[in-house]
Amino acid sequence: MIKANVISGYLNWTKIIKDPNIYLKKRLKILSKTPFFKNKNHEFSILLTNNKKMKNLNYKFRKKNKTTDVLSFPIKIKDKKKLYVGDIAISFEIIKKRSKETNFFLEFDKMWIHGYLHLIGYDHKKLDDFSKMFKKEKSILKYFHKVN
């Protein structure tokens, strides 16, 4: 089973997602039943925050003095039955802005899935890796949304 620890660092998140913990728990329950993730015992944390905090984190860890949509901090900590794979931070304002074209839940799902894939080893530095990661993101999103 895949588990997320949700840390609410910005109150505007709960104006749209009433209980982010329950929302992600339902998503991860579905994901844990899919063929690729069926036997994964992963745990990770998600910080739901804002642009200001994202800019600080981006500068502190990547030396980039600008905000960003999602940051992933992979780490492997093996416990008895599960593997802690790292932390994700997501910006409310960027998700909110993008959701004007689609919807907030779709954009949020895209971001945590993207972050989670980074935690488990996916990358997009090379074009071939980008294609593999993008394909995996789309295949996961289909379990939650109708996507093209």
Image (cartoon, rainbow, N blue to C red):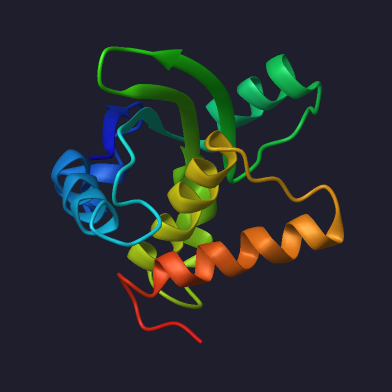
Q: Is residue 139 above or below residue 79?
A: below
State which quarter of the image contains the N terminus. top left
- Residue at 51% over, 77% down: 101
State which quadrant residue 14 falls in. top left
> Which residue is farthest bottom?
148
Q: Is residue 126 above or below residue 99?
A: above
Q: Is residue 17 above or below residue 6?
A: below
Q: Position of residue 56 (x, y in %)?
A: 64, 21
- Residue at 54% over, 51% down: 114
- Number of numbered discs: 0
103 sits left or right of 29 in the view: right
Q: Position of residue 136 (x, y in %)?
A: 54, 63
State which quadrant residue 3 falls in. top left
Q: Nearer the viewer, residue 121 or 62?
A: 121
Q: Position of residue 23 (x, y in %)?
A: 19, 50
136 sits left or right of 18 in the view: right
70 sits left or right of 50 in the view: right
- Residue at 52% over, 63% down: 137
- Residue at 68% over, 27% down: 58
Q: Position of residue 117 (x, y in %)?
A: 53, 46
111 sits left or right of 29 in the view: right
